[in-house]
Structure formats: C-alpha cells, structure tokens
Image (spheres, rainbow, N blue to C red):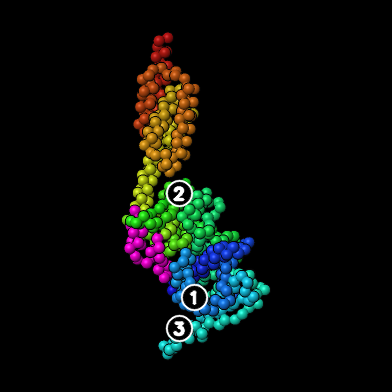
Amino acid sequence: MYADPLSVFREYVQNAADAIDEARQQKLVPNAEADVSIVFDHAARSIRVRDFGAGLANSLFVKRLTSIGASKKRGTTARGFRGIGRLSGLGYCQELIFRSRSEGDKKVKEMKWDGRILRERLRDTNFTGSLSDLVREVAVVTDLPAAEYPSHFFEVELSKVLRVRNDILLNEEAVRGYLSEVAPVPFDPKFKLGKEITEFLEEHGVQEPIRVVLNDKKGQIFHRAKDHFPISPKVLSTFTDVKFIKNLDSDGELLSFGWLLDHAYSGAIARSLRLGGIRLRHKNVQVGDGDILSSCFTETRFSQWGVGDIHVAHARIVPNARRDDFEHTPAHGKLIDEMRQLTREVTQTIRSRSDQRTKLRKVQFQLTYAAQWLEGSESAKSSLMVAAMVDRAAAHVAEAEKALGKLPETAPDYALVKEQLERTQDQISKRVRARKKDWSTESSYAAVFAILSSSSKLEAVLPLAERVVSAMKSADSARQALAA
C-alpha cells in the first residue's frame, strides 16, 4: 500500500493520536510515561505499538477491526478516516496482532491476522471466496486475562517482521528520525522558537501533541525542528527567527497556516538531517515528504534550503489513500498557488542572502587587511612607517564601514562584522593618539604612504617602503652633516 515501509509507523501513531484525543475528551487518567510506546524485540523480530488512549470496547472490537475500508472517523476531526491503514502492517510481517480494551471492560480482546495465509489466498487464482470469507480464514479472535494490561489501551503488534530495506523496520534510529518528521509530537523544550510556534498552532486549532517513546533509552521523540544544524563539519547555522503564514481562499475561508524558520540560507540542508523542506501537514500529521513542494520552486534545488510546516486547514483538501500527496481538487489547486508564492519568496530570500554574504565578505576582507597593517605597525622601526601603516589600516576600515552601511542589519553575521569593525576602529584611534609626528617633511610621509597604498598586501610593499625610509634617513643625515 505504501512505498516507504516506515509509513506503517505513521499510520499506527496517527490512529494512536486519535485514541489519545478521545481519552482526553473522556478525561481518562493518562499514562505517566508516554501516550504511545513503541517496543522493538530484535530476538523475536517483533514491534509493538501501544497507545494509552480510550481503547476499543470489547463489544465493538471484532466489527471495527474487520470492517475494511469503513471508518467511524469519516467526517470527524480525527486524523484517520479511510479504515484501511490499520492493516498496512500485514505487508511487512507474518502475523499482525491487535489487542485492546476500554475503561470498564473485564477482559482484553485479541485478533490475529495470519499474513502468510492471506498472501497465499491472494495469489491463489482458484480462490473464489468473498472478502468476508477471507477475513474469517485469516483472522482469529481470542479473549485474554486483563490483569497484565492497562485499563484502557490499544496496541498493534507486528510479529516475525520481514527483512526489507536493510531491516529498516527494526532500526530504532530510522524510526525515531521518521516519526520526528511525520508524527504529531511536540517541539523539544530546548528549541528556542518552539514555544512561540506552539502558541500559534494552538490559536489555529491544532490539537495537543502526543508523547511517543521508544524502548531505545533515548527519551521522548520531538519534532524535527532545532536551534542549529551543520552546514559543514566545523560550522553550525542557527535559526534566528520564525515567520508565520496564513492563507485564505476567495471566500475568506482558512486555507492553510504555518511557520517558516529564518536562517542564513547558506546552502541546501543535508537530507540525512531529516530537517529541510517546507512540509505539508493535515491535522498535524505530515503528508508526503520534504520534497512535496519541490515542483513549486522555479529551481528545485532550493526545495531543501527552507525549514517549515504548512498545516492544511480547508475541508475540501484531503490526503490521498497513500498519504504521499493530497487529492487534486479546486481547493488544492488554490493551495498550490499560495505555495508557489511562498516558494518564490523563499527563493528571493536565498538570492538576497547570497548577495549580502558576498558584500559582507568584502567588508571582512577590508577588516582583515586593516588588521594586518595594524599588526605590521607594531614592529615598524620608524614613526613615519608607523603613521603610514596605521593610516593605511584606517583607509581599509573606511572602505569596510562604507560597504557595511549598504547592508541591512538583518543580513547574516551583520552584528558580528559590525562588532569587529568597531573594535578595529578603536584600535586605530588609540594608535593615532599615541603616535609622534617626527618625520622631516610631509612629502616624505606622502611618498611612503603612496608606496604602501599601491597594494592591500603588506608583504608586497613593505620591503620597498622600508628601503625608501632608510634612504630618506641617510639623505637627511647627509644634509645635517653638510650643514654642520
């Protein structure tokens, strides 16, 4: 049913979130440690996804789980509504097991689906039974003692998991990363912009997120957003601000809302980080992946430069059966038009930031040259050379200040470069106040300064300037001797 095996986790966690919402409405006591626990047993090759939601009543258990393609959630605010996702795990295990009970039930109901028999019957061209016949043959229901189970819960167990894609279904790290992208989980408390985004989402009706925990001893799963991300092995880029987005249709009805993080846009974000891309979400569950809006970019390479979520709010925009995109409706077309406008703005920002970085580099080059001249002046042997070198540094600082003045204060690293500029200006001021003007003529200074100004690189002109100063001193000494 799904191209990505990990999609089964999205389906089961999505259903779990609906059950948690129902439990909250009923004011049932929540589990202290998690709303959803996912347990991996590598020895038995099994995965168990248990939620501590309202559970499925004994009286409804069989009917609900054998009604393929039917869902009581259709037409409600629930995330799942097609009634088919619960069986998605059958494609990846030999046996799929459901267990549940609701508050007040005296026993736990269990239903086992035999995946091997199911696949055999589906391949059997001589099988003429109905869907009901097939269900009766592959699904077995039993009652279990309730003492070992919570008072209200629902769980699905994939038993004897098949090896697919390097055994990705039993890879806790892959599952954790995947759920941080798609599941309705909260932001990490360490994420500085998380509280502001959460408040915005709550104002627009996004339901409370759920706590998902794996048995990998790494704690709760949080949303993929974070404060920093690496753009090279030694350099981190920081998210500095958040932009909130709200789109209405022609009738004034809310079409979508969301957020976009601001950063330096220094390059594409590595896919291995599971962070990049402007994602689409429906009822706070991701639809598709980080490339879902790549076709909206005039240059698709920019699709992984931004980080944000757009929550689809319009009732006429619904996910398709695979949940890798939305059904194509007029309302969806309007959404895509709005997303094209958003991606144009992102592209414009990327180009603007690139231009700003180029200009900032020019400022930094000027400040680097200024620092070299100041450093060289400290070892100069004559006051004339000191003065000329300090003034040479001042000329570079003046060029840097002029270039910086053309940039907005919001430019990447603007504050750091401005601080460096002010620090260099202060150093020059101190050197100017301390120097002594004891060279013989203004023309001597002008000659030396002209030599030093012929190149920004100190080492290229310093030897010649020193020879000229030495010659000037010799000539001055000779004149003084003749005068005597």
Q: Within 10 angstroms of label 2, few (less than 14), some, or many (20 or more) residues?
A: some
Mark 3, residue position: 131
Label 3 neighbour load within 10 Å: few <14, some 14-19, many 20+: few
Q: Residue at x 42, y 19 (%)?
A: 439
Please give the residue where the numbered disc 2 appears in the rendered image. 242
SS type, badge 2: strand
Q: Nearer the viewer, mark 2 or mark 3?
A: 3
* Real-space CA distance between mark 2 and mark 1, rounded to the nearest whole angstrom: 39 Å
* Mark 1 residue crowding within 10 angstroms, few (<14) / some (14–19) / many (20+): some
Residue 278 shows up from this direction? no
> What's under tag 2, amino acid-wise?
Val
- Residue 220 colored in magenta in the image: no
Between 277 and 185, the residue placed more toward the observer is 185
The residue type indicated by label 3 comes to: Leu
Q: Secondary structure at mark 1?
A: helix
Give, as a three-letter code, the residue at label 1.
Leu
